[in-house]
């Protein structure tokens, strides 16, 4: 096992997945890729916040994504991982994770069982379910 991809949305489950992936990467001397995905939403509160901050909605989302990646990096480094890379993608979450996994040719994808998904995720199926069905690599779902 040479490359492990872990996706985080900043939720408690995702942070548990990051910790698990970091321990796995350290134990296997594997490269750890930390991924978060910016999902554009048409949230009115977010629009108002972005106007008050004089920033676009995408800038606000990217700032949140960078914060999620910084927290994931901190967790991984706290577990002793040094060989890691952070990746920020935009788009639909499951598709972005799958594309990243294919492009990076990862051996394992680690995700949390339940993230901060929207109502559509409940109706259409969760990200973890999509990954288990479609991923080009082993998928570990952390409870």
Image (cartoon, rainbow, N blue to C red):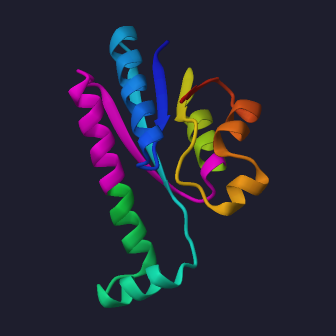
Report whether 28 appears left or right of 39.
left
Residue at left offset 27%, top offset 47%: 70
- Rendering quarter of residue 41: bottom right
* Residue 121 picture location, percent across and down: 69, 54
Q: Position of residue 94 (x, y in %)?
A: 64, 47
Residue 134: where, in percent of width, then height? 75, 34
**Image quadrant assignment for residue 15:** top left
On screen, residue 94 versus residue 2, left or right, reads right
Q: Is residue 42 visible?
A: yes
Seen from the viewer's position, the closer of residues 73 and 102 is: 73
Q: Is residue 17 magenta?
A: no
Tell me: residue 109, above or below residue 89: above
The quadrant holding residue 86 is top left
> Which range is magenta?
67-94
The residue that appears at 46% across and 82% down in the rendered structure is 45
| Residue at 71%, 31% in the rendered image | 132
Q: Is residue 78 left or right of residue 59?
A: left
Residue placed most toward the observer, 110 or 34: 110
Please name whichever residue, 57 or 43, is drawn nearer the observer in this view of the structure. 43
Looking at the image, residue 120 sits to the left or right of residue 56; the answer is: right
Instruction: Name the residue located 55 percent from the left edge and 23 percent from the top edge.
Output: 108
User: Can you say whether 74 is above or below 116 in the image?
Assistant: above
Is 79 in the magenta? yes
Q: Is residue 106 visible?
A: no
Looking at the picture, how far across and down is residue 91, in whole percent?
59, 59
Count of numbered badges drawn on the protein: 0
Q: Against 29, is 41 above or below?
A: below
């Amino acid at each position: 096992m040479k490359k492990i991809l872990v996706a985080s949305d900043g939720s408690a489950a995702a942070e548990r997945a990051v910790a698990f992936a970091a321990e796995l990467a350290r134990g296997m001397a594997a490269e750890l890729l930390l991924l978060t995905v910016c999902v554009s939403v048409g949230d009115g509160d977010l629009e108002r916040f972005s106007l008050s901050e004089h920033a676009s909605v995408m800038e606000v989302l990217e700032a949140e994504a960078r914060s999620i990646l910084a927290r994931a990096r901190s967790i991984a480094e706290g577990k002793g991982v040094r060989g890691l890379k952070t990746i920020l993608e935009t788009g639909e979450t499951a598709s972005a994770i799958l594309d990243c996994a294919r492009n990076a040719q990862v051996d394992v994808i680690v995700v949390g069982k339940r993230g901060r998904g929207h109502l559509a995720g409940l109706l259409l199926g969760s990200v973890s379910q999509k990954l288990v069905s479609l991923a080009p690599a082993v998928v570990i779902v952390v409870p």
